[in-house]
C-alpha cells in the first residue's frame, strides 16, 4: 500500500461537477494506492502510521489535532515508467481487490477516531487543494517495520 499525504488548509474532490468529499478544516489529503499483496493488516498499519504522523502544525499529528482527512483512491501510485514511454499499471491491484481494501482503510481510520471524507472509487475525479507548507510525504507499507 502506498499513500501520498499532503497537509492542506482546504481541499475538495469533484465528480462530474459535484463535490463528493471535502475537508471542513485544515487536515490531510491522502492519495491511496493498493498493490497485489496488500491485505487488511497492511491497511491497518498504514492507517495507524498516517493518523499518528507528527506532520501537522507544531509537529502535531492529525490524531492529536482531530484534523479531518480526505482519502482518494489512486491506482496510478503503482505506475511504473521503467520501460518505454507509457506507464505500466501492472503493480496496481485490480478494482475488485483494491476497492474493498480502500473501503477498509477508510473504515479503520474512522474506527481510530478520524473524520474522513472520500472521493469516489474508480471515478474520474478533480482534486483541488491548498497544500500547506508545502508539505508532502509518502508512506509505503514496504518501508514500514
Image (cartoon, rainbow, N blue to C red):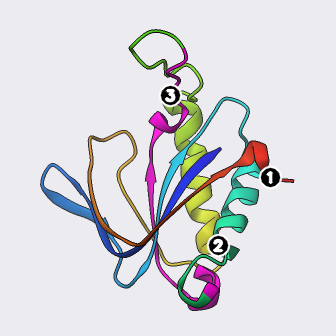
- From the viewer's perspective, tell me whether residue 16 is left or right of residue 101: left
Q: In the image shown, does 129 or 40 lie closer to the viewer?
A: 129
User: What segment is highlighted magenta in the picture?
Assistant: 59-82
For marks 1 and 3, the one nearer the N-term is 3
Q: Where residue 98 appears, x then y in whole percent?
A: 56, 38
On the image, which quarter does residue 142 sit in?
Answer: top right
Is 71 contained in the magenta span? yes
Which mark lies nearer to you, 1 or 2?
1
Q: Earlier in the sequence, mark 1 or mark 2?
A: 2
Q: Please tell me which residue is depicted at 56% across the width and 29% down the height of the picture.
A: 92
Local secondary structure at mark 3: loop
Q: Residues within 10 Å of mark 3 (few under 14, many from 20)?
A: some
- Determine the residue positioned at 12% across, 55% down: 17
Q: Earlier in the sequence, mark 2 or mark 3?
A: 2
Q: Alpha-carbon distance for marks 1 and 3?
A: 20 Å
In this rendering, position of residue 78 left or right of residue 145: left
Measured as percent of width and height from the top left, residue 16 is found at: 15, 49
For the point 70% across and 57% down, which residue is it?
46
Cα gap from disc 1 to disc 2, whole angstroms: 14 Å
- What's the residue at 80%, 52% (across, down)? 144
Establish if 133 lies above or below 96. below
Label 2 CA crowd tier, 10 Å (few <14, some 14–19, many 20+): many
Mark 2 highlights which residue? 51
Q: Which residue is mark 3?
A: 79
| Residue 24 shown left or right of residue 115 in the figure | left
In this figure, which residue is indicated by the disc labeled 1?
A: 144
Residue 106, percent from left and from top: 55, 61
* For the residues bearing labels 2 and 3, Cβ distance under 8 angstroms: no
The number of discs equals: 3
Amino acid at each position: 500500500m502506498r499513500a501520498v499525504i499532503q497537509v492542506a488548509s482546504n481541499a475538495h474532490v469533484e465528480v462530474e461537477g459535484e463535490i463528493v468529499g471535502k475537508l471542513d478544516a485544515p487536515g490531510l489529503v491522502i492519495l491511496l494506492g493498493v498493490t497485489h499483496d496488500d491485505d487488511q493488516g497492511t491497511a491497518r498499519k498504514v492507517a495507524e502510521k498516517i493518523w499518528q504522523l507528527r506532520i501537522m502544525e507544531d509537529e502535531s499529528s492529525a490524531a492529536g489535532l482531530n484534523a479531518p482527512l480526505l482519502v482518494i483512491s489512486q491506482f496510478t501510485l503503482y505506475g511504473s515508467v521503467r520501460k518505454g514511454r507509457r506507464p505500466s499499471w501492472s503493480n496496481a491491484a485490480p478494482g475488485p481487490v483494491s476497492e474493498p481494501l480502500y473501503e477498509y482503510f477508510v473504515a479503520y481510520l474512522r474506527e481510530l477516531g478520524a473524520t474522513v471524507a472520500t472521493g469516489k472509487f474508480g471515478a474520474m475525479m478533480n482534486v483541488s487543494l491548498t497544500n500547506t507548507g508545502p508539505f508532502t510525504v509518502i508512506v509505503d507499507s514496504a518501508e514500514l517495520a
